[in-house]
Amino acid sequence: MKTLISEEQVREGVTRMAFEINQTYANRPLTIVGVLTGSVVLLADMIRQLTMPLRVGVVQASSYRGATSRGPLVINSDLMPDIANHDVLMVDDIFDTGHTMAELIQLMEKLGPTSVRTAVLLRKSGQQEVTIQPDFIGFDIPNEFVVGYGLDYQDEYRNLPFVGALEDEDLQRHASRTKRNHDSC
Ligand code: 5GP
Ligand code: MG
C-alpha cells in the first residue's frame, strides 16, 4: 500500500478544518451529522477541536457493496437527531462523485434546518457529477481508491491512522482470500 497522506498530515488537515468550522459558526450551537461508517474516525478527532455548543448524530449511507465501484445509495436516517431550526454540519470521509452528499442534503433540507453545510476529509479531483461542493475540505486527492482513517475496502483498513492507496498486490491478496473463504464454505 502506498501512503497518500501521512498520519501527521491528516492531523494537520483535521486541525485546519476544525479551525475554519470554529470561525464560521463562532459560538452558535451546531448539530453535527456524521455519515456512517466512513466518517467515524474524522468525527471523533474533529469534534474534540470544536468549541461551540455541539450535538452529534449520525446517518447511514452506503453505496459501495464490497467493490470499488458505486452501487445504488441506501440511506438509513433512523438515528438522526431532530434538525428542525438547527444549524447542521454533515461530515463524511470522502467526496467522490458527490451523489451521496447531494442526496443527503436534499433529505436534510426537507426537515427544516436553519442551514446545512458539509465537511469532508477528502475530495477526489475531477470526479464530481453534481453542482454542490463541500464547504470544508481536508485534502484534494487524485482519482485513486483510498483506505484508512475511516475508509474501508471490504470492511478492512478503517483503523489505519493514515490515508493510503491500494495497489494491485493488495487487491490480489483480497481476491485470493475471498476465493479461499468460498472454497472452505
Ligand atoms: P460519492 O457518492 O461522492 O461518489 O461517494 C461517496 C462515498 O463513496 C463515500 O462516503 C465513501 O464511502 C465511498 N468512496 C468514494 N471513493 C472512495 C475511495 O476511494 N475509497 C473508499 N474506501 N470509499 C470511497
Ligand atoms: Mg461513506
Image: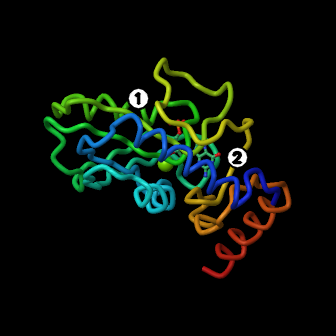
Residue 179, given in percent of the width and then of the height, sits at 71, 69
Inter-mark Cα distance, 1 to 2: 21 Å
Q: Amino acid at mark 2?
A: Phe
**What is the number of the mark on residue 102?**
1
- Residue at figure coordinates x 75%, y 52% from the top left: 165
The coloring applied to the image is rainbow
- Dot 1 or dot 2: first in sequence order is 1
Q: Are marks 1 and 2 in contact (CB under 8 Å)?
A: no
Rendered-image quadrant of the C terminus? bottom right
Which residue is found at the position 37% from the left and 31% from the top?
A: 103
From the image, tell me which residue sits under label 2: 145
Q: Is residue 28 above or below residue 45?
A: above
CB of residue at label 2: within 8 Å of ligand 1? yes
Q: Position of residue 175 (x, y in %)?
A: 74, 63
Mark 2, residues whose alpha carbon is within 10 Å: few (<14), some, or many (≥20)? some
| Residue 114 position within the rendered picture, expressed as x and y whole percent measured from the top left | 20, 30
